[in-house]
Amino acid sequence: MSVSKPIYGSNNQSITATTLKTLGNAAACSSLAVDNTSNLFLDALVSVTIKTSASALSAGANIAIYAAGTTDGGTTYGGGEANMGTDAGVTLTSPNNIVLIGIINAPSTSAVYTKSAMSVAQAFGGILPDHWCLVFVNNTGQTLVDPTSKYVNYQGLQIQTI
C-alpha cells in the first residue's frame, strides 16, 4: 500500500516585492512573478511581513494579500491590470479578478506584523499555476516602512508517494 507524504522545498525563498516596503495608503502593488515551470510545486506557502509607521492608523487597519496566476506563460495575470507580475504599483479594478489569500491586521503604530503559511494554490482550486504573483493592498491609513530584509518569502510543496 502506498502512502503520500509532503516534500517541502527550501524555506525562505524570496519573492521580489520591494514596492511593498513603502506602499502608500489605499495603494496596491504586485510582487515579481514566481516561475513554477522548473520546480513544479503543487503549492507555495507564503509569509509576508510589514511594518507600520508612527503615523495614525485607520480603524481596522490591514494589508490584504491576493494571489494572481496566469495560463499564458506569465503574460496576463488576474484581472489583466497593468504591471501585475512585476515589482510595481498596480491599479485594481472593482471588482478585480484576483483571489484573497490572507489579511495582515495591523492595530498598532511602529510595529512589525507577519502572516505566515498562506496557501497560494487555494486561490486556484488547489493547484499552483506555472507563473503566479502576489498583490498587496494597503488599508492602514499610512505609508508602510521597511520591515526587514526577508519580508516576502515562500516554501514550495510537492507530494511523494512511498
Image (spheres, rainbow, N blue to C red):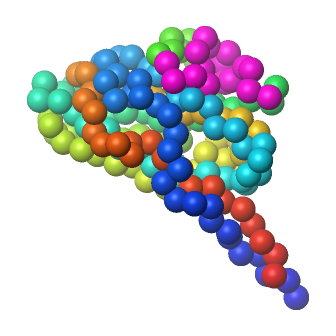
Q: Position of residue 14 (x, y in %)?
A: 50, 44
Image position of 110 (left or right of 80): left
Q: Which residues are magenta?
A: 73-88
In the rendered structure, the answer to whether residue 49 lies left or right of residue 155 reads left
Residue extending farthest right:
1
Rendered residue at 35%/17% (across/down): 26
Measuring 50% from the left and 34% from the top, which residue is drawn there? 16
How far across and down, in percent of the image, does residue 154 sit?
53, 50
Q: Please tell me whether residue 18 belongs to the stretch shown in magenta.
A: no
* Residue 58 in the image, given as x and y percentages of width and height: 21, 25
Q: Nearer the viewer, residue 46 or 78?
A: 46
Is residue 110 visible in the rendered structure shown here?
A: yes
Where residue 5 appears, as percent x and y from the top left, is 71, 75
Q: Is residue 131 left or right of residue 58?
A: right
Image quarter in which the N terminus is found: bottom right
Residue 74 magenta: yes
Asked where in the image residue 62 lies, by quadrant, the reply is top left
Kindly tell me whether residue 137 is visible in this rendering.
no
Quadrant of the rendered structure where residue 136 is?
Answer: top left
